[in-house]
Image (spheres, rainbow, N blue to C red):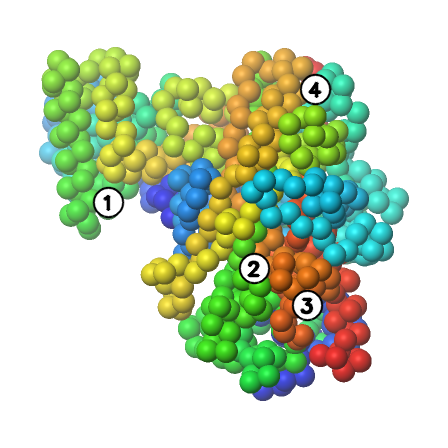
């Protein structure tokens, strides 16, 4: 069974609140909005931080950007992408082979970015440029592990469902028999 | 109320599986006074337990034992370990099914005669016909309270249906309605009326949908003649020196092996496990597997020609609200070879939630081509396309040479490649499905590939002649008088229709014949 079937995301949350000033004082910026420091990745404006133990924090910052570039939804905040890839840090703490695959994959991505004149993956300013880099590695186990995991770990977060209009469980509301199962008006 | 039978009691009928076939057969026999032990690999989940959450429910109900895949079908690439989306629980896949209850069309019982020679297809006529099945269908429809039969009203149309219906009518289709569904539009038969939850696939929490889990099984248990053993995973069927089956060996939840003696064994484990069980029951006397003198066990695996069309509109549809599959267009279900293929297909409304849409809309896809489609979720309408696929000998369930399951037994490999007729039909169906939505202003239509199989058919097929199949017209194996097949694996051909109603009708009919054979001392 592939990674995107039958598993649910390990962590619905796992992000900590943090003041912006506190994290900016500690870290270096990575990409547009992420800040990387010793053992953490944080967001410059959205007041969250994530402890990173199994991977290099810069690697996690790259994974978060990569997650958005693979499944870009402009109305989904970075925090949900961070939650979606956090499982790789947890798995890396227990599985050195997994950590090596992730670190190696990100290193390859940065090398490709450097060859293309971007410095690093996060240094490529346009999504199209980053996607062009991802296209070069899409057949690799690294890419497919990240992409396959996201199918569940991103789209099965209840917090993102309202962004798609999806209403989730209906039983506790008595179904839709009195709540618009046939309310279409534009036909 | 359950009737505990002794493991050594060789007067019982052992039914393996409690879904549409096994659950119905077990109850029908129990009603006739026959002692039945039903062995169910899964646990017992009832409406209170069902979960309105796609992945959580999948984890609760789905059959997730190890399986492998091969062949040209895309499922083998995208879901290599999940060839089928079926259920491991009391009630089997009647927990998960959508409720569509369609009779075979007359010609679909005689596919070989009707379609003639189709190169590469192993078509065969059923040894039964529409007239033979008519009274059994009537009993099944009454039992299941199928809408638009026996004076029962149809379900109300939801948003997804209204879009589908409007498009169909603009396109000129004539036979469009909310389906013949084994879902109560009005209360009855100890089942509530549908409350339009939108989670038919996750088990109906109101019990409005017919499922053996809360209809046939408790009714059978109430007679005192039926004992259902849960978490009883059958490993092999045993036979005596005379070739007749004598009992089955199963594993309990903790792995403990038990043997249940039997007068008759009926196999109803769905079309992957049923042939696998016969193959795994090989002995020195039957080295190719039980009831396999024809070599047909596991072959002719069918899964219906399927596909979906989702369409995005400028305004919201909210297709997830309400009964998942209460909508049908039957205009393409006839056999009209001018379309470039034999057989036909049904178009049925369908919706899946955001979590499953992400997994199934275009497996493996990424980037904005995919995510902009997901962004249109609220404005989507959806339909499923289900048509007759061609049986092929090489589409088969076989035992994997190396891979073993949790009990140390060879896992099943599911090999499947579309027949050119399947491909031609799917392309036609994609075009027509898209046209339905284009007719009412779709801005984007998406031909969506088949999901892991929900309709698994044909791997112990029914045949007039013993050399052509595995079972006779009663579902009794050609080789062994007291061994029966009671699920969709006995289908000779698949027709264009969702199979459950036919499985149930065959099970009611089989129970009648089996009880007769027993009382006459034939088995």
What residue did someone put label 3 on? Answer: B476
Q: Residues within 10 Å of mark 1 (few under 14, many from 20)?
A: some
What residue do we see at 52% from left, 39% from top?
B418
What residue did someone put label 2 on? Answer: B296
Q: Residues within 10 Å of mark 3 (few under 14, many from 20)?
A: many
Query: Is there CB contact under 8 Å for labels 1 and 4?
Result: no
| Labels 4 and 3 positioned on one and the same chain | yes
Q: Is residue B342 left or right of residue B398?
A: right
Of badges 1 and 4, nearer the viewer stands: 4
What residue did someone put label 4 on? Answer: B167
Circle count: 4
What residue do we see at 58% from left, 30% from top?
B424
User: Which comes sooner in the sequence, label 2 or label 3?
Assistant: 2
| Labels 2 and 3 positioned on one and the same chain | yes
Q: Is residue B88 left or right of residue B65?
A: right
What residue did someone put label 1 on? Answer: A90
- Tag 4's secondary structure? helix
What residue do we see at 67% from left, 32% from top?
B347
User: Which comes sooner in the sequence, label 4 or label 2?
Assistant: 4
Considering depth in this image, is B394 or A138 the residue closer to the camera? B394
What residue do we see at 47% from left, 76% from top?
B283
Of badges 2 and 3, nearer the viewer stands: 2
- Tag 1's secondary structure? helix
Chain ID for label 4? Answer: B
Q: What is the CA distance from the residue labelled 2 to the residue labelled 3?
A: 15 Å
Q: Is residue A41 visible?
A: no
| B359 up-or-down from B412: above or below | above
Quadrant of residue A130 in the image? top left
Q: What is the CA distance from the residue labelled 4 to the residue labelled 2?
A: 43 Å
């Amino acid at each position: 069974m592939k990674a995107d079937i039958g598993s649910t995301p390990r962590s619905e949350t796992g992000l900590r609140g943090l003041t912006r000033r506190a994290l900016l004082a500690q870290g270096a910026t990575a990409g547009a909005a992420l800040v990387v420091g010793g053992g953490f990745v944080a967001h410059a404006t959205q007041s969250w931080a994530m402890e990173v133990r199994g991977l290099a924090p810069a690697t996690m910052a790259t994974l978060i950007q990569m997650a958005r570039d693979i499944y870009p939804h402009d109305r989904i905040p970075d925090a949900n992408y961070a939650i979606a890839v956090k499982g790789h840090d947890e798995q890396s703490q227990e599985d050195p082979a997994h950590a090596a695959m992730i670190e190696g994959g990100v290193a390859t991505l940065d090398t490709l970015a450097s060859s293309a004149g971007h410095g690093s993956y996060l240094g490529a300013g346009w999504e199209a440029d980053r996607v062009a880099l991802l296209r070069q590695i899409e057949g690799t186990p690294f890419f497919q592990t990240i992409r396959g995991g996201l199918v569940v770990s991103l789209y099965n977060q209840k917090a993102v469902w309202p962004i798609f209009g999806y209403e989730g469980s209906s039983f506790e509301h008595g179904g839709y028999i009195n709540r618009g199962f046939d309310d279409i008006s534009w036909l | 109320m359950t009737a505990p039978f002794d493991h050594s009691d060789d007067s019982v009928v052992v039914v393996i599986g409690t879904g549409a076939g096994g659950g119905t057969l077990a109850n029908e026999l129990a009603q006739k006074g026959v002692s039945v032990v039903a062995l169910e690999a899964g646990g017992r989940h009832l409406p209170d337990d069902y979960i309105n959450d796609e992945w959580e429910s999948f984890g609760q109900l789905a059959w997730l034992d190890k399986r492998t895949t091969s062949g040209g079908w895309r499922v083998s690439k995208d879901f290599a370990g999940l060839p089928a989306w079926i259920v491991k629980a009391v009630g089997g896949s009647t927990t998960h099914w959508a409720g569509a209850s369609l009779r075979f069309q007359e010609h679909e019982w005689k596919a070989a005669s009707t379609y003639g020679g189709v190169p590469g297809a192993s078509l065969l006529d059923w040894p039964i016909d529409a007239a033979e099945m008519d009274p059994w269908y009537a009993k099944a429809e009454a039992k299941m309270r199928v809408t638009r039969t026996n004076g029962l009203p149809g379900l109300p149309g939801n948003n997804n249906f209204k879009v589908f219906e409007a498009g169909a009518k603009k396109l000129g289709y004539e036979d469009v309605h909310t389906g013949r569904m084994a879902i109560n539009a009005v209360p009855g038969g100890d089942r509530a009326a549908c409350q339009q939850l939108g989670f038919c696939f996750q088990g109906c929490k109101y019990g409005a949908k017919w499922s053996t889990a809360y209809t046939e099984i408790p009714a059978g248990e109430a007679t005192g003649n039926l004992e259902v053993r849960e978490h009883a995973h059958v490993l092999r069927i045993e036979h005596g020196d005379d070739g007749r089956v004598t009992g089955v060996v199963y594993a309990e939840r903790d792995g403990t092996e038990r043997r249940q003696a039997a007068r008759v064994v009926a196999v109803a484990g769905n079309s992957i496990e049923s042939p696998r069980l016969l193959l795994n029951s090989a002995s020195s006397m039957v080295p190719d597997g039980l009831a396999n003198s024809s070599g047909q066990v596991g072959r002719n695996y069918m899964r219906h020609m399927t596909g979906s069309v989702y369409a995005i509109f400028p305004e919201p549809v909210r297709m997830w609200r309400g009964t998942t599959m209460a909508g049908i267009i039957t205009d393409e279900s006839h056999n009209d070879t001018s379309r470039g293929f034999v057989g036909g297909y049904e178009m049925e409304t369908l919706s899946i939630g955001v979590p499953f849409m992400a997994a199934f809309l275009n497996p493996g896809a990424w980037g904005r081509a995919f995510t902009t489609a997901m962004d249109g979720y609220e404005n989507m309408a959806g339909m499923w396309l289900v048509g007759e696929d061609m049986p092929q000998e090489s589409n088969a369930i076989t035992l994997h040479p190396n891979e073993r399951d949790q009990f140390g037994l060879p896992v099943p490999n599911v090999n499947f490649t579309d027949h050119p007729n399947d491909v031609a039909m799917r392309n036609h169906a994609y075009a027509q499905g898209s046209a339905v939505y284009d007719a009412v202003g779709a801005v984007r239509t998406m031909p969506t590939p088949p999901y892991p199989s929900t309709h698994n058919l044909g791997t112990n097929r029914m045949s007039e002649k013993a050399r052509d199949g595995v079972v006779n017209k009663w579902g009794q194996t050609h080789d062994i008088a007291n061994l029966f097949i009671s699920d969709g694996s006995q289908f000779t051909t698949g027709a264009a229709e969702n199979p459950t109603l036919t499985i149930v009708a065959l099970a009611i009919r089989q129970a009648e014949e089996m009880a007769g054979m027993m009382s006459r001392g034939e088995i």
